[in-house]
Amino acid sequence: MIREYLRSLESALATSPWIAGVDVKRCDVLETPCESILVYRFRVRLTDSSMLEMMERVVFGGEPASMITTTYCFHWQDREGRLKRRWDNAPHFPRLSGFPHHIHSGNTTEEVISGESIDGLRVLEYIGRLFGTSL
């Protein structure tokens, strides 16, 4: 399941026309008898010269078997380095209804709205829709 998810991510990154390039900073899969863990960090250059930093830790296992994103941060910035949007689950906004999931939604990190758990594929789908395509 973890490797299928990774293949789906890699395929989306390789075939999306709005992606200019991908730098793999880290991509590790750890297999244990009880679970599989994927940790990756990608730097994605988009055709409009914006940049998407993707970091995610995904665990598959348990009874019943399930796949859970335990840690994530998807940071999208424009060509000048200004924040466009960042999705993350760092536990630093406990008053938000979706805690710890939140979205930095403006030019500053203080503009924060409640979010929900999200993964890399859903972030790519969101950005792809803004570019007029889908995965």
Image (spheres, grey):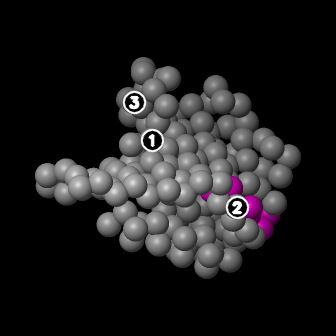
Mark 1 or mark 2, whichever is nearer to me: 2
> In which quadrant will I find the N terminus?
bottom left
* Range of magenta residues: 42-48
Q: Tell me the residue that label 2 is attached to.
A: 23
Q: Residues within 10 Å of mark 3 (few under 14, many from 20)?
A: some
Where is mark 3, residue-wise? 99
User: Contact (CB < 8 A) between labels 1 and 2?
Assistant: no
**Does 74 sit above or below residue 98?**
below
Work out how far the residue at label 1 is from the one at label 2, CA to CA, in angstroms: 20 Å
Q: Amino acid at mark 3?
A: Phe
Q: Name the image quarter holding residue 65.
A: bottom left
Secondary structure of residue under mark 2: strand
What residue does disc 1 label?
Answer: 71
Say which amino acid is labelled 2.
Asp
Q: Main secondary structure of the magenta part?
A: strand
User: Residue shown at 78%/41% (left/top)?
Assistant: 82
Are discs 2 and 3 less than 8 Å apart at CB?
Answer: no
User: Quick one: SS at disc 1?
Assistant: strand
Q: Is residue 73 left or right of residue 20?
A: left
Residue 44 sits inside the magenta stretch: yes
Which residue is at a point 74% across and 61% down the rendered structure image?
Answer: 45
Q: Please name which of the two marks, 3 or 1, marks the residue nearer to the observer.
A: 1
Distance from disc 2 to disc 3, alpha carbons, whole Å, reads 30 Å
Horizontal side, residue 17 vs residue 63: left or right: right
